[in-house]
Structure formats: C-alpha cells, structure tokens
Image (spheres, grey):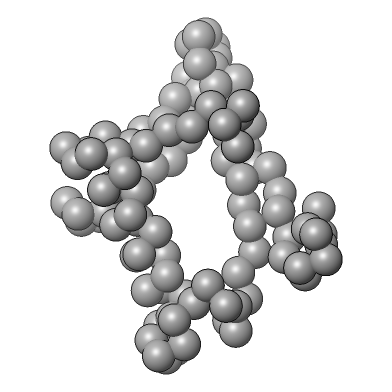
C-alpha cells in the first residue's frame, strides 16, 4: 500500500520465498541482521518473507539530533533491539503472521 492509514508511509511485502530459510548476515556481535535464501529445489518445510516500510529523512521515528547519519543510526538501533529481543547468542526473534 502506498499510503497506510493516511500516514504517507508505504508498506510492502517483499521476497516471499517458499522453502526459504533465514540466514545470519551479522556485521557486529551486538547486532542482529538476517537475510533470506532457499535452495533451488525449495524443498524445505519453511518459508520466509519480509515487510518493507518506508522511512523518510524527516520521519518522526528518527532522532534528528543524529544529523545526516540519522537513518543509519535508526537502522543500528533496530539491529541492536533485534539482538536483545532474540536473547543474544545470535538468535533471531521471530513472529508468526497471526501475531502481526
């Protein structure tokens, strides 16, 4: 959708991958970053998907005191929070579609 709830924010499903798996793509030990992949036969019992939400440079979720790096700092805060929510030890937090 291009304008979720009149907010001007877009929200899109991205990369539904049948037979997919979530794989770590960490850049630092205190961050949680993942990517999705599947083998060519797509024979796993699982699937993965993602939601993408737009964030503008003047978005209220950004700390404007971070200056030009505010979007990158927002990303790092999300990655740190994901690591905490996963309980550490490189465990990724997960949520079922019914929980959204």
Q: Is residue 48 visible?
A: no
Residue for point 50% across, 16% down? 46
Residue for point 26% across, 53% down? 31
Q: Nearer the viewer, residue 26 or 64?
A: 64
Q: How many marks?
A: 0
Q: Nearer the viewer, residue 41 or 48?
A: 48
Whole-percent x, y for residue 17 in the image: 59, 27
Q: With respect to residue 15, does 28 lie above or below? A: below
Q: Is residue 41 visible?
A: yes
Query: Image check: 90 left or right of 51?
Result: left
Q: Nearer the viewer, residue 98 or 27?
A: 98
Residue 30 figure quarter: bottom left
Query: Image check: 96 left or right of 68?
Result: right
Whole-percent x, y for residue 88 in the image: 19, 41
Whole-percent x, y for residue 36 in the image: 47, 35
Residue for point 48% across, 11% down? 44
Whole-percent x, y for residue 1 in the image: 81, 53
Q: With respect to residue 15, does 31 lie above or below? A: below
Residue 60 figure quarter: bottom right
Residue 4 figure quarter: bottom right
Q: With respect to residue 21, does 26 lie above or below? A: below
Residue for point 34% across, 65% down? 76
Quadrant where the C terminus is found in the figure = top right
């Amino acid at each position: 959708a291009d304008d979720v709830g009149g907010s001007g924010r877009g929200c899109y499903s991205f990369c539904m991958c049948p037979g997919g798996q979530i794989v770590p793509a960490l850049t630092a030990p205190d961050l949680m970053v993942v990517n999705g992949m599947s083998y060519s036969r797509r024979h796993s019992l699982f699937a993965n998907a993602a939601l993408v939400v737009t964030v503008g440079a003047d978005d209220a979720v950004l700390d404007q005191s971070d200056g030009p790096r505010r979007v990158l700092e927002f990303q790092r805060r999300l990655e740190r929070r994901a690591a905490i929510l996963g309980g550490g030890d490189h465990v990724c937090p997960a949520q079922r579609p019914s929980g959204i």
